[in-house]
Structure formats: C-alpha cells, structure tokens
C-alpha cells in the first residue's frame, strides 16, 4: 500500500529546500569575497554582477513597466540598479577595511531595517516589536565594536563598518521597493543586474582606472559570487517565496549571519572569540523579534 501525500506537502518541502539553498549560498558570500581580495573592489563588483545577470537569465520574461507611472519607471530602471551596485560595492569595500566576519554581520542586519521600513510605510509608525528587535540586533553589532572603540583600535575599520551598514541600508530599501513595486521585479533581474554591472564598470574606470579582468583565484571567486549568492540564490529564493509560507521561509534567512561567521572561522580567515557567536545570536534574535 503506497503512502498518500498531501498535495500541499510537496510545495512546502520544495520551498524549504530552495530557501536552504539560498541561505547556504548567501552564507558563503563573505568567504568568497575574502578569496577575491586581490581584485579591486569595484572591478570585483562588475564581474560579480555580470555573472549574476547571466545566472538569472532563466527568470527573464517581458514585464510591462511602461504601464507604471514615470516615478516607478525611474525607480525600477535607475533606482534599483543603483541600490544593487551600492549594496554589492560597499559590502566588498567594507570587508577590505574592517574584519570580514564583523563587517558581514553588520550587513546582515538588513532584515531588521527592512521590517522597520515596511512598518513605517504601511502603518505610518513603528511597532514596538520592530523597535525592540532592532535594538537587540544592533546590540550585537555594538558588542563587536564598543571594546575596539574604547581601546582606540577602530581606526580605518570605522569606515569599513560604516560601509557595511550602508550595504545593509541598500538591501533593505531594495527589498522594500521589490515588495512595493506595482510590477514583479524578479523577471527583470537579469537586466537590472546588467545595468548595475555597467554602473560598476564606469565607477571602476573612473576611480580605479583599470578595466582588466581579475586574475586567477580572484576571478574565480568573483564569478562564483555572481553565480551563487547573486545568481542561483536569488532564483532559489524566488521559488521558495512562490511555493512556501513567507514567514516560514523568511525565518530561515536569519541563520545566514551565524553560518557566514562559522565558515570564515573554519577557513581560518577569522579568529573565534566569544563576542562573534554572541553577536551573531543577538542579530538573529533581533531579526526574529522584529519580524514577529
């Protein structure tokens, strides 16, 4: 006698599996960025976004953006590519100027910022749970930074942490626009990533003066970043949200900071002390509290 499966059961497990693929790939992003440190950050951004554009081509389909107002057209074709470029480039630069695990952890506070932005736009005010969650999450970041600040050891790392926070803000605004846009943005992702890549190429030419491809390990890491965290992960996340329950799928993303820090420690690129796992747990708890 064959077991009978609920028709809703397969999509649920399918969505969880797809979400876990996205989480694992996002967790590997800081490690891959460390392997690509030999490449100038804006040049690495261009390579990553180009690879991401190619990886997301299966999602591409025609969307009538012209039917939206001119404000939304400008937001889609200019604002979102600028946000993607800003998020990726400041993330890479921040990880060059500050310790990788700490900078990555600050960037992964973006779900809290997204929740606060969504609450403000929807209700015209912030809910207590969102504010408390943000305070918990940012106390994790403070746990990492305050001892260094007291001892006067931040130095150039301060700029790196600020850029990591700017990357978090870019991802939060991008996520809010994706949610609020009158058209689906996922089918436009290959073109949006390609526009962001063009911006990165122009910025690299102006600020770095070099359009040559990275060499060896840095090139492979840049391609892997585009194909994985900024390519396949976005496809998997789209499928997870399409098939599964948003709150269940979304909660899985809160494990990214812990997994990312763990991978960096295991690879010997970060030193493990009690503050790093404690801060990661605080960020996850803060995200969960804000999401409730």
Image (tube, helix red, strand yellow):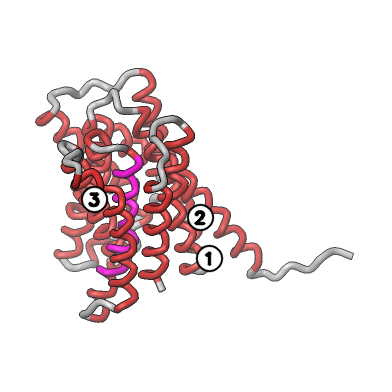
Nearest the eye: 34 or 54 = 34
Residue 243: where, in percent of width, then height? 53, 64
Of discs 1 and 3, which sits in the foreground? 3
Query: Looking at the picture, does residue 118 appear above or below residue 220?
Result: below
Q: Is residue 113 magenta?
A: yes
Rendered residue at 26%/63% (across/down):
177
Residue 19: image tag: 2
Upstream in the sequence, badge 3 or badge 2?
2
Residue 101: where, in percent of width, then height? 35, 41
Of discs 3 and 2, which sits in the foreground? 3
Tell me: 205 left or right of 34.
Answer: left
**Labels 1 & 2 near each other (Cβ < 8 A):** yes
Q: How crowded is the residue under tag 3: few (<14 C-alpha within 10 Å), some, or many (20+)? A: some
Residue 143: image tag: none
Which image quadrant for residue 228?
top left
Residue 99: where, in percent of width, then height? 29, 37
Q: How crowded is the residue under tag 2: few (<14 C-alpha within 10 Å), some, or many (20+)? A: many
* Element carrying mark 3: helix
Q: Which residue is mark 3?
A: 146
Q: Which residue is mark 1?
A: 244
Residue 24: where, in percent of width, then height? 49, 46
Rendered residue at 30%/48% (across/down):
144
Rendered residue at 53%/53% (across/down):
18
């Amino acid at each position: 006698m064959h077991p009978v499966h609920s028709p809703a059961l397969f999509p649920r497990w399918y969505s969880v599996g797809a979400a876990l693929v996205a989480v694992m790939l996002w967790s590997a992003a800081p490690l891959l960025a460390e392997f690509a440190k030999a490449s100038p950050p804006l040049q690495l951004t261009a390579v990553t976004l180009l690879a991401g554009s190619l990886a997301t081509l299966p999602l591409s389909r025609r969307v009538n953006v012209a039917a939206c107002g001119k404000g939304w057209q400008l937001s889609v074709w200019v604002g979102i590519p600028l946000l993607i470029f800003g998020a990726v480039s400041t993330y890479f630069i921040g990880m060059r100027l500050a310790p990788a695990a700490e900078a990555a952890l600050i960037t992964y506070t973006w779900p809290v910022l997204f929740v606060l932005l969504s609450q403000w736009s929807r209700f015209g005010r912030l809910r207590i749970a969102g504010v408390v969650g943000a305070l918990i999450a940012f106390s994790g970041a403070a746990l990492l930074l305050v001892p260094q600040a007291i001892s006067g050891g931040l130095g150039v790392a301060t700029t790196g942490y600020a850029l990591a926070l700017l990357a978090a803000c870019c991802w939060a605004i991008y996520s809010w626009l994706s949610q609020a846009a009158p058209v689906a943005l996922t089918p436009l992702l290959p073109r949006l990533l390609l526009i962001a890549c063009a911006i990165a190429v122009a910025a690299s030419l102006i600020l770095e003066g070099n359009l040559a491809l990275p060499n060896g390990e840095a090139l492979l890491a840049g391609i892997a970043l585009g194909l994985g965290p900024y390519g396949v992960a976005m496809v998997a996340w789209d499928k997870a949200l399409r098939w599964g329950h948003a709150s269940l799928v979304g909660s899985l993303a809160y494990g990214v900071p812990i997994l990312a820090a763990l991978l960096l420690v295991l690879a010997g690129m970060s030193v493990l002390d009690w503050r790093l796992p404690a801060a990661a747990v605080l960020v996850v708890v803060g995200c969960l509290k804000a999401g409730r």
